[in-house]
Image (cartoon, helix red, strand yellow):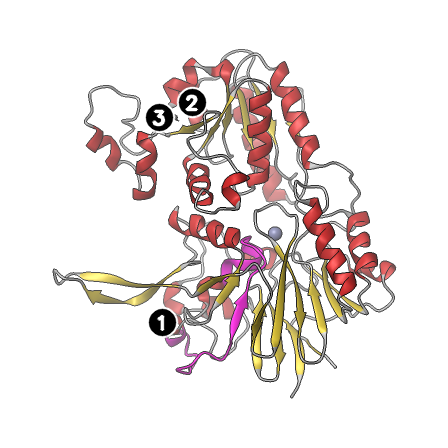
Amino acid sequence: MQSSITFYGGIHEIGGNKFLVQDKGTRIFLDFGMQITKANQYFGDFVNPRALNGMGDLFEFDLLPRLKGLYRQDYALHTGLEDSREPAFDAMVLTHAHMDHAAYLHYIRPDIPVFCSEATKLVMQGLQETGNKEEYVVFKKNFQLKKDVRGRGEEFQQDRAIKVIEKPFKIDSIEVEPLAVDHSVPGVTGLIIHTSKSSIAYTADLRFHGRRAKDTERFVQKCSESDIDIMLCEGTRVSETSSRTEKDVESDVKEIVSKTKGLVVCAYPARDLDRLLSFYLAAKDTDRDLVIDLKQAYMLKLFQTSDVWKKVFPRPDDKRLKIFIPRKSWGLVGRQGWPSRLVEQDYDRWEREFLDYRNAVNYQDVGRHQKDLILYCSDYQLQQLIDVRPMEGSGYIRSLTEPFNEEMEFKEERVKRWLVHFGLLAREEGWNHSHVSGHGSGDQIRKVIEESDARSLVPIHTEHEEYHRKWHDDVKLVDLNETVTLD
Ligand SMILES: [Zn+2]
């Protein structure tokens, strides 16, 4: 029987990886992400795919492959996609919890097992429990209510079959070896896969300049020992050069903070816990506390449940951290004389426990201790500056990717306007920018390609396949939805 890989995404584009590996009748998907750029051409802001049309709105623009026995049956019913009782796929193996690799798990049947690292599971759990609409870890059946004990309609939900993997495992004839790599979210795994016909390596997203460069080294080393026939190699930043590291970001932050007299306001990628760590360590070194938001506190709480990760990231009640409790609809936080029960009602269930933490702070606390704090404030939390009122001599650090389209540029201009208004930025100066990407630059990807020494190469997650061709003499350029036979 045939052995093959079909590329349903991540081809001639950055992200949206969905690779189907088939061997002797076993079918497993490697990642099932959203094609963000393409999806944004049709959806966004107030135009969203409608659940009532199942996968139909996404099929309309070829944003999901039409396959039977793959999708959740509550949606399939509404899509006119006749579906079987049994799943036609054996597993979903996820490399990490970024949207362009995992978001469309939402559409998958809950009885298809999902294999991922412990950290990937924790990030997905955090995303779902703090209000992301993607059903990563818990599947909620649509269009159907079951009666609860009091006879009221109750949502039907079930946990997805998520299996945490750290060691090699087998799915019928396919053997999967998960290997940690360094990227901008915890728990990313590169994969080496042995089918009955050949060996495949899949880089996931990787780099050598983060806190976990040794993991990437080990992955490449393992590839070179594994006699790889075909390597699926990312190339997000192949056309770029940069030698800056996460450590450089940490020392930049330290330097800027030590020169700032008032409050330091900062923005960084919310789920990049290694970046949070850079700000945390810089805070420690400058004798300040880092004020994080509720979602980050929740993520840190989840990571404390892991024996491995609890040693890596601080606890949410760490003495160098403060948790910012924002004013919500009633705006009672920080106002005297209101019963705590009423204040609590303003907050989602997952947020409430943090109200009682000793290190919880509100805008008044931050306002009073500006010189001692670094305040995380994303582009979506700028209103908090109205409450906090940064003092003279305050500053701002931006630790995010630069805008790469007009929409992002427009949004950045708006952020700058807020910062100028609050004296965090003088109109004539650029802002303090310190950031490194989750993806290796050209020289790093070249090193991965050369040292892995795979027989052939498929460029994925890139718009610049020409670099892979420069660095390897057997590059297969495949098209979207194309199947490559392995022999
Ligand atoms: Zn990623």
Quadrant (top left/top right/bottom left/bottom right) for the C terminus = bottom right
What residue would you read off at disc 2? 386
Determine the secondary structure under disc 1.
Answer: helix
Q: Amino acid at mark 1?
A: Asp
Q: Dot 3: within a 10 Å radius of its alpha carbon, few (fewer than 14), some, or many (20 or more) residues?
A: few
Which one is nearer the viewer's eye here, 240 or 22? 22
Is disc 3 placed on a helix, strand or loop? loop
State the residue lying farthest toward the left: 150
Q: Which residue is mark 3?
A: 358
Tell me, yes or no, if residue 431 can be seen here: no
Marks 3 and 1, how far apart at CA: 44 Å
* 221 to the left or right of 275: right
Inspect the magenta stretch and tell me whether residue 415 lies in it.
no
Identify the residue at horizontal 66%, vertical 48% (top origin): 182
Residue 105 sits above or below residue 79 on the image: above
Region rendered in magenta: 76-104
Residue at disc 3, CB closer than 8 Å to ligand 1: no
Quadrant of the image for the N terminus? bottom right
Asked which secondary structure carries label 2, the reply is helix
| Circle nearer the N terminus (1, 2) | 1
- Residue 468 locus on image (x, y percent): 81, 60
Q: Residues within 10 Å of mark 1 (few under 14, many from 20)?
A: some
Q: Which quarter of the picture shows residue 140?
A: bottom left
- Amino acid on which disc 2 is placed: Ile
Nearer the viewer's eye, disc 3 or disc 1?
Answer: 3
